[in-house]
Amino acid sequence: QVQLVESGGGLVQAGGSLRLSCVVSGRTYDTYTMGWFRQAPGKERESVATISWSGGSTYYADSVKGRFTISRDNAKKTVYLHMNSLKPEDTSVYFCASRRLGAAEFGSWGQGTQVTVSS
């Protein structure tokens, strides 16, 4: 089993930046694809960014391309989401999740961290 703990959320003005962190504990960290997801009130959860276990493959939602960067430090068992040029529409609870090598879905989730972007 994998445990995920997010941090780094907060209140920021539009145009500002935040860095979210997700610390992973439990089973072998570097065999997992990691992802960041978000869910705003009344909306469905959406995938924001994912990164392969090696860090060589990344995915970004169109809405965050060019503004957000996902990265991971396997030695620290931590995955990051660097968020720049934040917009009010980025306001959401952000979740970290992991997917085992070969698995179809993200099976472990953190508790979430709130990001609020004021206009």
Image: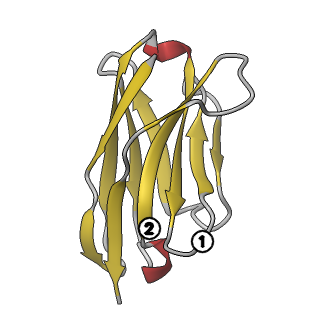
- Please state which amino acid type lies under the numbered disc 2: Ser
Q: Secondary structure at mark 2?
A: strand
Q: Secondary structure at mark 1?
A: loop
Distance, label 1 to label 2, CA atoms, is 10 Å
The residue lying at 61 percent from left, 33 percent from top is 106
Tell which of 12 and 46 is nearer to you: 46
Q: Is residue 16 above or below residue 69?
A: below
Q: Quadrant of residue 53?
A: top right
The residue lying at 60 percent from left, 59 percent from top is 45
Residue 118 located left or right of residue 70: left
The residue lying at 58 percent from left, 30 percent from top is 107
The residue lying at 42 percent from left, 31 percent from top is 72
The residue furthest top is: 28
Q: Position of residue 15 (x, y in %)?
A: 36, 78
Q: Which residue is mark 1?
A: 43
Q: Which residue is mark 2?
A: 92
Tell which of 27 and 53 is nearer to you: 27
The local crowd at label 1, few if under 14, some if 14 to 19, many if 20 or more residues have their Cα within 10 Å, is few
Q: Are marks 1 and 2 in contact (CB under 8 Å)?
A: yes
The local crowd at label 2, few if under 14, some if 14 to 19, many if 20 or more residues have their Cα within 10 Å, is many
The residue furthest bottom is: 119
Q: Position of residue 42 (x, y in %)?
A: 56, 75
Q: Quadrant of the C terminus?
A: bottom left
Residue 51 located left or right of residue 2: right
- Please state which amino acid type lies under the numbered disc 1: Lys
